[in-house]
Image (spheres, rainbow, N blue to C red):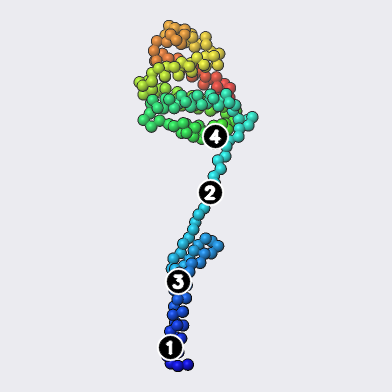
Amino acid sequence: MTSDIKDKVVSLLKESRSDREKHNDHRITINGNANAVGNGNTIILTEKHITKTKAEPKPGKEHINESQVRKLHDLKDKIIELERITKKNPASHQKVWSVFNKKMGIGSMRMLPSAKFKAGEKFLNGWIGRLTSSRMAEKKARDTVEKTKLKYIRTNMRKLNCEERVRDYMDKNFGVRSTTDLPDLGAIKQVYSFVASIKASFEQRKK
């Protein structure tokens, strides 16, 4: 082989090897973990799909019925109404139920045991009582406060079978025997407190 031909063969072999190296520089390898490696860079794919399933409460016979659920919702609505009137940052519907559920030791109002209904009702009524007793409530929602307290008085007069006792109290202190004749909010609040004390005494005797 002549020197010229030999030089050409060596040159061609070098070019061929250089081309292969360039080709290999652009090669990308993908492994089973969806990671791609090549050309001096690493690409990591981290696609992940998560499906969340929300568990729906399934109350049974041992839980409160629809009528009791409705009563608790009505009390909650009254709380929301008074919260909006009396506070700069009123509690939301979710907040009321969150506090209620924590107090009752349950995950959902609908899962309240029937045996705890009275306790739940008492808790919400107590919340309403605190709101209606505030000066802001009396100033901004006098009619609402009066109606709420009168409803409490009348409901418990029947429930506790103490109508005559309450009428005698109103007659002695205000000269009237009907709640509709009470002269002002101060009188209504006084009778409200009297009925509340009767109720507390009644509940204490039941324990």
Label 2: how many Cα within 10 Å (few below 14, some 14–19, many 20+): few
Q: What amino acid is labelled 4 in the image?
A: Ser
Q: Position of residue 59 (x, y in %)?
A: 61, 32
Q: CA distance from mark 4 to mark 2?
A: 25 Å
Q: Are marks 4 and 2 in contact (CB under 8 Å)?
A: no
Q: Are marks 3 and 4 in contact (CB under 8 Å)?
A: no
Q: Earlier in the sequence, mark 3 or mark 1?
A: 1
Q: What amino acid is labelled 1 in the image?
A: Asp
Q: Give the total of numbered labels.
A: 4
Check disc 1 and report the residue beneath it: 7
Classify 45 as above or below 167: below
The residue depicted at 42 percent of the width and 10 percent of the height is 182
- Is residue 135 visible from the viewing direction of this image? no
Q: What amino acid is labelled 3 in the image?
A: Asp
- Is residue 100 visible from the viewing direction of this image? yes
Check disc 3 and report the residue beneath it: 25
Q: What amino acid is labelled 2 in the image?
A: Ile
Q: CA distance from mark 3 to mark 4?
A: 61 Å
The residue depicted at 51 percent of the width and 67 percent of the height is 29
Q: Position of residue 87 (x, y in %)?
A: 38, 28
Q: Earlier in the sequence, mark 4 or mark 2?
A: 2
Check disc 4 and report the residue beneath it: 108
Q: CA distance from mark 4 to mark 1?
A: 89 Å
Q: Position of residue 60 (x, y in %)?
A: 63, 32
- Of the two numbered discs 3 and 1 in the rendering, the one whose residue sits closer to the viewer: 1
Q: Earlier in the sequence, mark 3 or mark 4?
A: 3
Q: Position of residue 207 (x, y in %)?
A: 58, 24
Q: CA distance from mark 3 to mark 2?
A: 37 Å
- Of the two numbered discs 4 and 1 in the rendering, the one whose residue sits closer to the viewer: 1
Q: Mark 1 falls on what kind of element?
A: helix
Q: Earlier in the sequence, mark 4 or mark 1?
A: 1
